[in-house]
Amino acid sequence: MTEPELVIASSPTDAGIGCWDLHTGAEHLRYRTCSSPSHGLTCVGGRFLASSQLRETKSSSGSILYWSWNKPQVEVKSFPAEPIYPLVSNSEGTYIAGGGASGEIYLWQVATGKLLKKWHAHYRAVTCLLFNDDQSLLISGSEDGSVRVWSLIMVFDDLLRGKARQPYEFSFSEHSLKVTDVVIGYGGANAIIVSASEDRTCKVWSLSRGKLLRNIVFPSIIDAIALDPGEDVFYAGGRDGKIYIASLNAIADPNNNYGLHILGFLSEQSKAITCLALSTDGSLLISGSEDGMVRVWNTKNHNITRIFRHAKGPINNVVVVRQSSLMSNRGTVNSQMSSVKRHGVSLPPPLEKCANSADENDYKAVIVPRIDPDRSVEASYISIQSLSNQILELQRQGSSAAAEMEIERLKLDRSRSMQMIQQWETKFQSLHQFCVTELLDGEKAGNA
């Protein structure tokens, strides 16, 4: 059975936020008063929506707004030190990162609103941000044409950062114009990164080697990309209204009309494609366009299965959220909304404009990489050993953060143990199936 998912879309004009059930088409609550920049809409840990805001193109200030699931009105307003363009949350919803017009990156703790860190990341405005799958890395793209990979451990460790030759893990600077979108695959430090730019190229990078793997030239500027879960292809939304299908492995016919590595395209004669997202299983591709439409495509037969119409104005953000991630009690979105109405759930406080210098010496951020089944045991061991060393150091300093980090370490140990159990269960089932198959084949051969 297909897991229920929501499609959430916003516009750069003051057209609010639309929310629909991806599979039934039913419209949920429509949220008011939202003028989000591209990549400026995020769902924070399934608990609430957050969006950066830019009321005027030349405005020297901006805001970040929060909406709960059951109310159309804005509930929390934050006013950062400068306009924030991309806004992203880690999967647990504990941190929010924002990219500034000046090239600064800001990292806040959601529960307290504290500004934990800010650093100068790019020479020009940050255009896109995302966390990798184990939440240990932050990837940024910029108007300066570069894509940079930041280790969150290094960001918070002044000693480690001081020893490094540069503050980032990698800086990819082969794009000649503004970076418009960045996506990352699975595999932790071994994942691939795909970036799009106004130079009409998409580039595929190796995160483990820090090298360019493939350069694909498109007939049009690409503003949005989505990576298929199988990582065989990715989709690239062009300003010509087409969604190109590009291969990550096979080479397309060099004599085709699209270009090398481009397998084909999806099109319904719409205006420029501004944003793309995929359903969890990759069977549905969701596109947002300047014509104000959200289209749902079947990735197997390339047909449109559903169209959502936004209130007015172009679409510039599309986010797909699993309904199971919205619930604390595994209910439906409607039941959660009813529960909120009965009991009331307060959203976190506004985000700090500037770091409180009085708290800097007392507060320590806890950045814990998640254990991935595909990640090597050695890498997991190193992460846990590093965390244990940090705990001992904080205990020597008498910091209250030590207790918090000890809890995180125990959670990490439990998570790793559970994943090891699941891996052994999978291996046992595979071995059992193999033995049964061999016995049945042997009996058939004997009877014959």
Image (tube, helix red, strand yellow):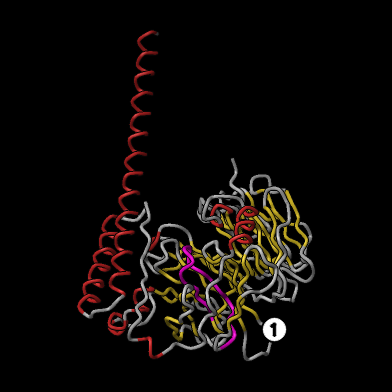
Q: Which residues are magenta?
A: 82-99
Residue beneath label 1, please? 55
Task: Point out the image quarter for the C terminus.
Answer: top left
Between residue 182 and residue 331, name the one nearer to us: 331
Q: Is residue 337 magenta?
A: no
21 over 175 or under it: above or below: above
Between residue 75 and residue 161, name the one nearer to us: 75
Residue at x 54% of width, y 68% of height: 182
Q: How many marks overall?
A: 1
For residue 421, what is the image quadrant?
Answer: top left
Q: Is residue 87 magenta?
A: yes
Residue 192, x across and y down, in percent: 45, 62
Residue 113, x across and y down, in percent: 49, 78
Residue 156, x across and y down, in percent: 35, 79
For residue 224, what is the image quadrant?
Answer: bottom right
In the figure, is residue 270 to the left or right of 4? right
Query: Which SS type dominates the magenta stretch?
Result: strand
Quick one: SS at disc 1? Answer: loop
In the figure, is residue 100 to the left or right of 306? left
Residue 357, x across and y down, in percent: 40, 91
Between residue 219 and residue 430, name the one nearer to us: 430
